[in-house]
Image (spheres, rainbow, N blue to C red):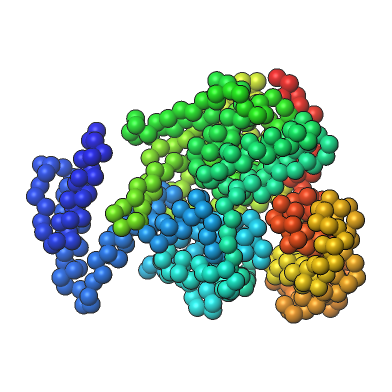
Amino acid sequence: MRKPWFWLSLTAALVLGVLLGARIAPVISGDNTFEQLRKFEAAFSLIKRNYVEDIDSARLIEGAITGMLEQLDPHSVYIDAARMRSVRESFEGSFEGIGVEFNLLPGPNGRDTIIVMSVIPGGPSDRVGILAGDRIVAIDDSSAIGFKQEDVIRTLRGPKGTKVKVTVRRPGLSRPLEFVIERDRIPIFTLDAAYMLDGQTGYIRINRFARTTHQEFVEALRELKAQGMQRLILDLRDNAGGYLDQAVEVADELLPAGRRIVYTRGRLRQFEQEFVSRGGGFYESGPLIVLVNENSASASEIVAGAVQDWDRGLIVGRRTFGKGLVQQQYELPDGSAIRVTISRYYTPVGRLIQRPYQNGKQAYYEEIYHRGNALLDVKSFAEHVPDSLKFKTPRGRLVYGGGGILPDYVVPQDTARPLVQADVRNSLSYEAARRIVDEEGGELRRQFERDLKAFIERFQIGERELRIYRQVAAEKGIQIGAVADAAPDSGRTRFTEAEFQEALPVIRTRLKAFIARQLWGVKAWYPVIRPLDRDLNEAMRLWDQARALASN
């Protein structure tokens, strides 16, 4: 097994030799790796000398690096210098843009597609209805198919207050969706909300694991305990992951001393690690429920896996994404970087959470959209799992490997009414709430004196607000009070008055939640939208089971 310095030296020699047009003298007699490097050098030299147009050597090398990494796994990637600056900002500081993290799905003939990996809660894209998994196919009416990373950053980043129009394809919908996004300063805070659901239940939502997550989590626990918290719901839904060390620190706050949190195994021993809880955490013994869904990935799965494997709490929601690969980031001289998978991580009882990816990136990222509600309960899932993927916790509970964390209690996805689907797709509630705040915001602030609790208890969506909603719908081509059309739910634009009345409780709640978010920020969204949160409402019925685990 050769030392890392050997490969770094060889790579440096190769790049230098290629760029200078020189030949590299053999350094390993009979080594197949060296023969392949010579093959690459020969191909580059031939292209550089003979291609019909002038060659941009840097772009050619970047293409070669990208191509190499695409032969590995979906999470080993090349990040150019411009995007690397954006990545650092999104985890270390604030920046201005539309508030999404993206990747590129390889397409034929270099026609890659932009896929939204996660949406920063409270950011511009979140406010208009962009979702994780959306494919951005056009930007300002120009095709974005075939964009490179620097093209995405150049067109989507921009000064606060400027606007950009994006067209997306959403899995499951037959027609594209258009959004006009006003760029804004993107916050770095990773806790969206921390408040008391009732006199004894604390709620904390973490949107990603960045540099400040553990500190924010501890501060939230301290404040909730001061308010009388005796049980906790930790919401990791739509949390795409982030820093491993922050996930370990958060898990450590929930586990007593001496518990393995996660361990990694790789080809090189230097990349094998084990993380064990130290004790003294802020919430080691009370009833605990963790909410997850199909967009909970990586660091989120580490926390959920540790909680489940140690019988520390209940996992509620839907099976998680299934990313169990650990990447090491290596910076290159021009400020770009490569992230290379160096190991796999395993939960305390030995489960590998990584999903199969042998069918390519496209199939890998689309698999979660085809799960549907097939997993309606754990028992039916267990009947089809081979014994090799069944594991037991210390209390003898069965848990399962094979891709993602399977919750202890599965909550099916909400199948929304057609008009509610149209509301979400076309950002009707968001736009109507914006206009309501423009017209009534001053009065609302005076009436409730910035008291969110009073707003939640007393403010009601009346006929005036609903007239604005209907006006917004009409402007966006959604007809209410018409003869219903026969298009599929995802493409309908005409709805009867009866359908509107049926959807009205949901629309009222969404309108009120968007108004609250514009008046008090993203933290206000969660307590207002709570009546529509099926996962959370189901979790609140499971405290007897969570208490039984905590007592042991």
Above or below — where is 355 with respect to 265?
below
Q: Residue at x 67, y 29 (%)?
A: 283
Nearest the eye: 274 or 70? 274
Q: Image quadrant of residue 23?
A: bottom left
Q: Residue at x 15, y 70 (%)?
A: 49
Quadrant of the snapshot with the N terminus: top left
Q: Residue at x 87, y 53 (%)?
A: 454
Could you say where residue 484 lies in the image, as x and y percent from the top left? 81, 75
Residue 386 visible in the current orientation: no
Q: Residue at x 40, y 53 (%)?
A: 77
Is 163 left, or right, of 331 in this rendering? Answer: right
Q: Image quadrant of residue 214?
A: top right
Above or below — where is 69 with respect to 349?
below
Residue 84 visible in the current orientation: yes
Could you say where residue 44 lies in the image, as x and y percent from the top left? 20, 63
Nearest the eye: 371 or 194? 194
Nearest the eye: 345 or 247? 247
Q: Image quadrant of residue 489?
A: bottom right
The number of callouts visible is: 0
Is 312 left, or right, of 76 in this rendering? Answer: right
Is 70 left, or right, of 474 in this rendering? Answer: left
Could you say where residue 506 lies in the image, as x and y percent from the top left? 82, 59
Above or below — where is 13 with respect to 268?
below
Could you say where residue 375 lies in the image, as x and y percent from the top left? 67, 43
